[in-house]
Image (spheres, helix red, strand yellow):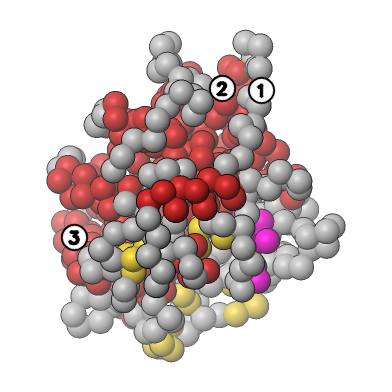
Amino acid sequence: MVAYSRRDVIAALGAATVLPLMPGCAFMGGAERYLAEVRRRYVDELFGSIIPFWERHSIDREFGGFLTCLSRDGAPYDTFKHLWMQWREVYMFAALWNAGYRERRYLDNALHGFDFLWRHGRMPDGSYHYLLDRKGSVITDVDGGMEVFTESFAAIGCCELYRATGEERFRREALNAYGIYRRKTENGSGKYDLLAYPMIELNVLSVMRAAMGGGYEKEIGTAISRIRRFAHPGTGIMFERAPKGGGFELDTQFGRFVNPGHALEGCSFIMRHLRDSPDAELRRFVLFETKVMGEFGWDPVDGGIWYFRDALDRPMSRHEYFLKAWWPQNEAASAMLQAYELSGDEWYLDFFRRIDEFAWRNLRDAEYGEWFAYAPVAGRMFHDYKGSRFKGFFHLPRQLLDCIQAIDRIQRSSSPHPSVSPRTSSFPRA
């Protein structure tokens, strides 16, 4: 690996990635009306389209669990059961119940999924399989490292069930799954540290703290410090991987890999923590990062958040990099609205509007309900399915629910925080 000095890194990144600041939108006192319209639309979409689609097509009444590989009209095209998607659906239905939407079937749906996973997915050591067939027989437990995250989703699903029911078995299982996930990821992957590991751990810890009545401050602080390690101190670009021992690797596309959606998702989790534990320095950091990664991830020609980017804008062999997938739009929208709530700066609200308009126009399916996985490319829709091994009842309903709740908090608040502009804010060091 070529040894780059700090000056080399800043020069290389700065030349390739410093973008002109997007102009903000002057809402002319209409921000309240705009947010009220967004809230109405999101409530209609979540409860009139998204939830009904998954309740109609996903719940496997015959064998248990959920069918998640769904065609445009909801018909299953694959009956394998990926445990990521199973646990995420458990989590989301229980989270809706805990958010105050007390439709008994939401809790029943979550319990339905848990029962299948407990009977068929759990191994003797407390960890979980990765892929089952429809009836619950094991297909495989490996998928190039992706399997490491299964227990993280088990942990948040069980946390929400514990919060909903108070049953000790769910608390025990949440703690067990979190412990397994932490042991699997605490040493990174090979020669690299991975942003996804602490980012997802922070989410687990935040859900655990909410469900279990506090605690985990030390662990949350450690996870946030680990996330900050991936933010370049000269430009704010947040890398997906970084060499163990410090620094950044710029001579390989592997080291230059940037996932804007992951970075903005991590920012969302940090901002959720700040609502309970204010910290002025961390607030400056996350607002700066949200602006940087929003601008860096945005396609200024066609709109939308890119799937992947090279930190130096060099060629990528990941051929899906140019796609506009559903989940980066979801995570970016949630991050921008939370940043507006945290700062009162309408720059974030305008960026939220840009993402919302792009996603609503390009991903939403008004005919069959739910959203497509990818926006059209050059006017052509290459994939029209609604669920897959990675797309399920998770990112989109979580974004809609998070944004509804953020708007409710904004409407209740009479004194938004002062804004922080990237023109004047220095990058906070980790």
Q: Could you tell me how far apart the alpha carbons at marks 2 and 1 are, in whole angstroms?
A: 7 Å
Amino acid on which the number 3 mark rests in the picture: Leu
Q: Which mark is residue 25?
A: 1
- Image quadrant containing the N terminus: bottom left
Which element is circle 3 on? helix
Q: At 72% across and 67% down in the image, what residue appears?
A: 383
Amino acid on which the number 1 mark rests in the picture: Cys
Q: What residue did someone put label 3 on?
A: 175
- Give whichever of discs 2 and 1 has the lower sequence position: 1
Q: At 70% across and 38% down in the image, what residue appears?
A: 357
Q: Which mark is residue 346?
A: 2
What secondary structure characterizes most of the magenta part? helix
Which element is circle 1 on? loop
- Image: magenta residue range: 319-327
Q: At 39% across and 84% down in the image, what residue appears?
A: 142
Residues at marks 2 and 1 touching, judged by CB atoms closer than 8 Å: yes
Q: Which mark is residue 91?
A: none
- Give whichever of discs 3 and 1 has the lower sequence position: 1
Amino acid on which the number 2 mark rests in the picture: Glu
Which element is circle 2 on? helix
Q: Could you tell me how far apart the alpha carbons at marks 2 and 3 are, in whole angstroms?
A: 40 Å
Which is in the foreground here, disc 2 or disc 3? 2
Residue 337, given in percent of the width and then of the height, sits at 51, 32
The local crowd at label 1, few if under 14, some if 14 to 19, many if 20 or more residues have their Cα within 10 Å, is few
In depth, the one of 110 and 305 nearer the eye is: 305
The picture quadrant where one finds residue 67 is bottom right
Is residue 83 highlighted in magenta? Answer: no
